[in-house]
Structure formats: structure tokens, C-alpha cells
Amino acid sequence: MTLLARRPRAVLVVLALALTAVVPAMPAARAAGDHHRPVGGDLLRSRGLVVRVPSRTPRPPAVSAASYVVADLDTGAVLAAKDPHGRYAPASTLKILTALTLIPRLSPSQLVTATAADADVDGSKVGVVPGGRYHVDDLFRALMMVSGNDAANVLAEAAGGGSATIAAMNERARQLGALDTVARTPSGLDVAGQTSSAYDLALIARAGLGLPEFRRYVATRRADFPAPGGRRFEIYTHNRLLVRYPGALGVKNGFTSTARASFVGAARRGDRTLVVTLLRAQPRVWDEAARLLDWGFTAGARARPVGTLVEPEPDPALANGRLDGTNPHAASLPVPPPGHPPLALFGSAALVASGLLGLRMRARDRAAARGGRQRPRALPPL
């Protein structure tokens, strides 16, 4: 007689224990992402405004954004939120996930070659040319400063191709607990099914600001980018909060006609660092972000948390130790150095067209010949 026939209950118990040993348990933070309990806490299931402040304490200012989060990057406390897990088209704010995913996987000094498909991408571009060779470091600056969709595509190809990059982005989002996020492009251009949430963008920004390279890219206000013939031209940040708001650290703006304006910003005052994320807002999203940050640094300091930014799983790409700071505790974040004069504030989208690029380089050469300095142009908003 077999053991199963003689002691069926004992055998079933042994089999159950064996299965338990080989099937990994789901981390608590991820288990919270089911349909019954949203990631970050029960209050964050609300589709409306959720905030807990003492009586006679101002509530957050009204803004046009359909969804937003104000959170403390040091503690992870969510101070206020509106439809925090609502899924919206993220536009170019998705590029913070692209950067977070690819920075550990690419060497800043690596040279990569752009293709005609990269140069022909829709939307905002820095102006790569087919056959041009670019350092990864320059491409990341273009990605985060001027929202270069062409730079996003070149970086994705350098990391193994668009499909591999998108798969890595979605896996990184899962590791962070950003379960509302579905990446379909490395650039954030509108594609059916591509979504994120204000809560997820706060998680992604928090993780990104834990990487020194990421902090440097998003805090850069002006830089040079390679042009044909060994020349370089100037690019300027599109992030108006970075150049207007005291203590701003960066992060990323976005806009498409479908997504409307989206924005992720971080700022530090005293010993506190806050992040604000907004989705589906009106174009003057910078002003809304500034008002929410002002509230967070003042009245928001007395608010009781309505949720928390969950701690991420580690990124296996950081296992080689090339980067430090796998977990972003913003108390160590530096305030960006003083910026350039207000004339050098805004994005150089006009440089996308090769004709305008040539005019700008020739004007720069003439200015240099005269020993003068070219006055940067103020360009229209995105």
C-alpha cells in the first residue's frame, strides 16, 4: 500500500508546505495594490480631494488639474491628494520613468548613433541628426531639459531597443509599486493604453531623485548639445518652476493635446523637501504647482498624512554598485546652484528645425567674433 493511500492527509500537508516554500510571498506594499485597497493607504481611493488639516487651517488651493498629489519626500507622507490613483495619459512626465530605468543601465560616456527614425519622431525634439554620434550624458540632458522625443528613442535603442526598454520601464514601475503606470513608449507620446497616476509619478520622482545623475539632469538649466561639424548649441530647460521657484530641484513637465498639461516638481525649503504631481491640467500648470508647494510648506506642514509613498523594491540594475542612492531620502538632496539670469530661462524648441539651428550657430559665431555674448531668445511655452 502506498503512502498516499495510507496517510492521504499527511501527504497533502507535505505538498502544501512544499508549494509554500517555492512560491514567493507578495510583498505587503504590492499586495496593497489590489482593487480592494489602493497602494499607499485606504484614503487614496478617493476620486475627489482628500486632506486632513486642523480647523481654521487653509486647505489646498483650487487648481485645474484633474488629479494631483503633494507629498513629503523625506518621510513619504502624502499631505493632500485629488484622485491620486486616477489613470491619465502622462505625456512627457513619463520620461522620468525612462530616465530612472535607463540611467543605471547606460554609461554616461557611451557613444550612440542616431537614425533617421529617431530624427523623424513627432513632438518636441532636441535635433539629433541621422548618423550623428551622441554621448549618453548629452542625451539624458536633452531628454529631461527640452523633452527630446528623439533623445528618448536614441537612448532606448542604446539600451537594447524600444521593446526591451518599455519592458524594463514597466518592470521598474512594478518594483516601485507604481501599479497605475503602463508604459507603451519611452517618450510619453500619446498611445492607447499608456497611463500613469499622480501617485505613481510621485513614487517615480522620489526614486529618480535618489540617483545622483538624475538629480543633476533635472536641475540643469542651461547646457550645450552637439551639432554637425563638431559644433555645439545651447539648450535651456523647459521647466519654468526650476527657474522661478525658490528651492526648486526640477523635475519634468509634459503636454499633449490629449493629455493636456502634466507636471512633476520638487522643491526644498529648510529641512523639508516636497514633491507635487499634477495630471490633466491647464497649460499654466507651473503656477498651480507653485501654489500647491506653497501650501505644502506652510499650512500643509500641519496636515495629517492621508497616505504614504510606499518604499520600492531595489532595482537589480544597481547591483553592480555603479550608482549610489538606491532609495531616495530627500534630506540629502542638494539645492541646485544659483542659475543663470532670467534671459536664459526657457526651452529652445525652435532649435528643432535644422534651418533655425544653422541660423543660431552662425549668429553665435558672429557674436563670438565680436567678443560679445549672444542674448538668448524667450520662446513660447510648450
Image: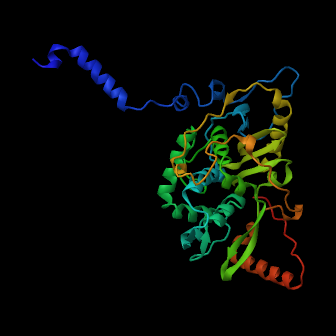
Number of numbered callouts drawn: 0
Residue shown at the point (75%, 55%) measured from the top left: 219
Residue 91 appearing in the image: yes
Name the spot of residue 306 as percent of width and height, x first: 70, 26
Residue 117 in the image: above or below residue 284: below
Which image quadrant is residue 221 in? bottom right
Residue 365 in the image: above or below residue 87: below
Which image quadrant is residue 107 in? bottom right
Quadrant occupied by the N terminus: top left
Which image quadrant is residue 223 in? bottom right
Residue shown at the point (71%, 33%) measured from the top left: 75
Asked which colour scheme the image uses, the reply is: rainbow
Residue 241 in the image: above or below residue 273: below
Of 249 and 252, which appears nearest the observer? 249
Name the spot of residue 139 as percent of width and height, x first: 64, 65
Quadrant occupied by the C terminus: bottom right
Name the spot of residue 251 as percent of width and height, x first: 72, 50
For this orientation, the residue located farthest to the left is: 1
Residue 257 appearing in the image: no
Name the spot of residue 108 as percent of width and height, x first: 61, 63
